[in-house]
Structures are given as C-alpha cells and as structure tokens.
Image (tube, rainbow, N blue to C red):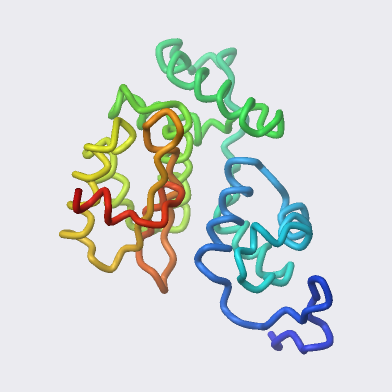
Amino acid sequence: MSATSDDQRPTIRGKRVRGRQTSLEIEMVIREYARVEKFTPTQIYRLLKDNEKLLKGHDLPVLRTVQRIHRKAVPPDPSGPWSLADAEVDPDDAALVLPVLAEVIERSGGRWQQFSKDLAGWIVKVRVAAPDIPPRWAFTVAQSYQAGEKHKEAVDGLDQMLGFAPWRDKAHVRRYFLAVKMLHPEWRTHVEIAANGKPDYPMLYSRAADGFVIAITYTEHPEELIHA
C-alpha cells in the first residue's frame, strides 16, 4: 500500500497533517470514543478535526488510521445480542450485567443499547472476580479482555490490575502503580483522581511500540501517587 502523498493529506485550520505514527495520546482518544461512546471511525475523525483540544498539539491522523485503530479497539463480535429473555441466561448473571448496561447507556447517550453475548459473558466474569468493581470499570475491563482474546494478546496485566483493585481509592492506586513499576517498568501509566476522590475509569490496551498501557485517564504528576 502506497504512502499518502502530501496533497492527499487532510488539513486542519490550514495546516498540513503529517504522515507519521499516531501518538499514543491520540490513539487513546480514538479507542475511548470507539469503545465507550460507540462512535464510528468517521464520527471520531470529524470530532478530532473539529476539536483541537482533543488533539493536544498532536497531528490529526488520516481517516484510514482512525479506521485501523477502531478495528482493533472494537473487533468483530458475531456472538449475537445478549438478553435476559434468552433461555440460557442465568438470572444471577443478568443481575451483574444489567447495572453495567444502564451505566453504559447513560454514558453513551443511548448509542449503546445492548451488549453482545460474548461481552456480557466477560462482564459476568469480571464482576464475579471483583465484586466491588464499579460498573464503568467492569465494562472497560471486560472490553479489554474481549479484545485481548480476539487479537491473541496477553491479558496478564488485566489480571494484575483486578488483583490490586485500583478503583477503590488513592491508596490502592499507589500500591498498584508501585507493583506496575516493579513488574513492568516499560509500561506507561497515568491516572486522574475524580472530584469524588476516587480514581476515574481506566482505559487499558496494548500497543506493540509501547507495551501494555495502564491509563486511568490523566494527571500531570502520577509520581505523586507513587512517592507520596
């Protein structure tokens, strides 16, 4: 496949977009809008093009790049829609899935309306393994397990995160990040503590150039949590 020529690249406010590897920060934005908000690649591209704040000083990726990242973030899922009405669905399992579905419907403004059978199965596994995990975290972690399985990627980082339960409070975030630094010094980590004093939901994924990335959204000084 030939590289995109300069005259084919899009512009933003008159500036030519460079043909270089998409930054990790922009890839995170694309993945979040693909997974959590259920935006299409074209919607995400237009959002980035029209909102320079989301670009954070980085280059605007071409639509083809957004499509490629979107495909990896949201792999094909032929398992079919999940419903309590299905004869094989255990009501006890449904009790774990339905609060997550409600959270995701609200978060996405209705773009999410139901889960697939495969994703619902991962949500059940995550919530049984970590009963106190918040619905938003359970959704994101379940998606990451599902994508890891589809792409045959290691998911040991997800197992470790569930073990340390960083959603609980700052002390658990600090303990978890200390373990990450010890086990995986190459990993990139950053965290944001929400207004309620608890860690915001995570974005978790792997990229060959960066190893496994733990992104509990963002803060300028994550070392404050590690060295406090």
**In the rendered image, is residue 122 in sight?**
no
Q: Nearer the viewer, residue 50 or 145?
A: 50
Q: Residue at x 50, y 35 (%)?
A: 119
Q: Nearer the viewer, residue 191 or 195?
A: 195
Residue 207 in percent (x, y) is at 44, 66
Q: Nearer the viewer, residue 182 or 66?
A: 182
Say left or right for 75 vs 179: right
Q: Residue at x 31, y 63 (%)?
A: 187
Residue 58 in percent (x, y) is at 61, 71
Q: Is residue 200 above or below residue 186?
A: above
Q: Residue at x 37, y 31 (%)?
A: 197
Place residue 38 in its image quadrant.
Answer: top right
**Number of numbered callouts drawn:** 0
Q: Is residue 102 above or below residue 195?
A: above
Residue 153 in percent (x, y) is at 38, 59
Q: Residue at x 38, y 58 (%)?
A: 213
Q: Is residue 93 above or below residue 59?
A: above
Say left or right for 177 vs 200: left
**In the rendered image, is residue 114 in sight?**
yes
**Could you tell me which quadrant the N terminus lies in?**
bottom right
Place residue 51 in its image quadrant.
Answer: bottom right
Residue 78 in percent (x, y) is at 60, 42
